Image (cartoon, rainbow, N blue to C red):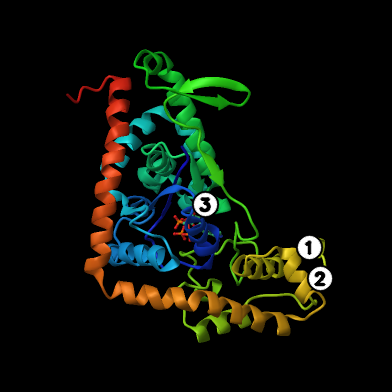
Amino acid sequence: QPLVFSGVQPTGNLHLGNYLGAIRKFVALQETNNCIYCVVDLHSLTAQLVHDDLEGQTRSITAAFLASGIDPKKHIVFNQARVLQHAELAWIFNCVARIGWMNRMTQFKDKAGKDRENASLGLLAYPSLMAADILVYRATHVPVGDDQKQHLELTRDIAQKFNNDFSDRIAELGLGVEMMMGEEKVNGFFPITEPIIGGPAARIMSLRDGSKKMSKSDPSDLSRINLTDDADTISKKIKKAKTDPEALPSETDGLASRPEAENLVGIYAGLAEISKQDVLNEFGGQQFSVFKPALADLAVEKLAPIAGEMRRLIADPAYIDSVLRDGGDRARMLAEGTMKSVRQIIGLLDN
Ligand code: AQP
């Protein structure tokens, strides 16, 4: 039975990259799957412990989920800190994973910078908590942007090592399920999760620098389109977006060495839900003075209703909290079911 899980950190304004790379996929997947979507507040402590308004940020991400079309009645929407089993399983995974695995993570290297000795231990262990978020529900599929690919590979490594290390115990207790590991059929407790990455908007880049991903923590607000930007701001940011002086090519090959042009075409394709080639079929040969206003109109058309609904929801924090409470209660029941088995497999008495 497929089960979808994904999370978003409450670390700042959600932007178009988060929306196209992740949230829009969450919405599409809920049509045919059971889904669990989480505001990962514990993760947001890894790079910055003290936040100005963590409660407000958590509610704002929840509002973005709901405003984008996630149905909290049919699926589960909650914040991570309500379900202690995430932290419990993360501790166990800290003991499964190896320090070398964590040290190799590019996100850790980027976020820790040069002064690694001073990075928090939580930042190093981030992928272990992420693996716990997913595997505490034994989720099979995880929609994410391209930047999370390496962390998902680590989740698979952790699941595989746990299954191997405890294979006798899992078999003895009859807690395994049959699954394919490459060519081999094995019996494991945790599934080997599949990432769902891809499409024209898997990695949206900064509007100011085509070599950097669009990010909440970029100091320049002009580098990103926030989900809550008004129409004028969106138009201004797209107008100011860095480009080159050439017209758009008519084939995608012509975008290869033009990262800023490729990014804007990818954003258009993502918003219109068409391929980059379809965009070039329409705009190939045109200057940015024609393409940018068309892109701005499309972005406003798609984002304005979400921003409006987010504002309405944020004005009702009691409703948002009730969604998170209800989702947390349902998530906890599932997570505790997994942890009962995990404790039994390891030999941690909880009776
Ligand atoms: N630029 C992007 N393009 C496509 N997808 C993206 N995602 C993030 N940036 C892009 C995807 O959004 C989801 C939620 O991300 P997150 O907030 O949990 O963490 P992040 O990847 O660290 O996002 P940011 O915006 O870059 O935040 P900061 O600046 O706080 O680090 C994930 O699925 C992510 O892949």
Closer-to-camera residue (69/53): 69
Q: Label 1, label 3: how many angstroms apart (C-alpha)?
A: 24 Å
Question: Do the residues under discs 2 and 3 have CB atoms within 8 angstroms?
Answer: no
Question: Do the residues under discs 2 and 1 have CB atoms within 8 angstroms?
Answer: yes
Amino acid type at image mark 1: Thr
User: Looking at this rendering, what residue extends furthest in the left direction?
Assistant: 351
Residue topped by disc 3: 144
The residue lying at 32 percent from left, 72 percent from top is: 313
Amino acid type at image mark 3: Val
Q: Is residue 74 above or below residue 59?
A: above
Image location (x, y in percent) of residue 243:
70, 75
Residue topped by disc 1: 252
Image location (x, y in percent) of residue 96:
41, 28
Residue topped by disc 2: 249
Closer-to-camera residue (20/154): 20
Question: Taking the image as drawn, is residue 82 in sight?
Answer: no
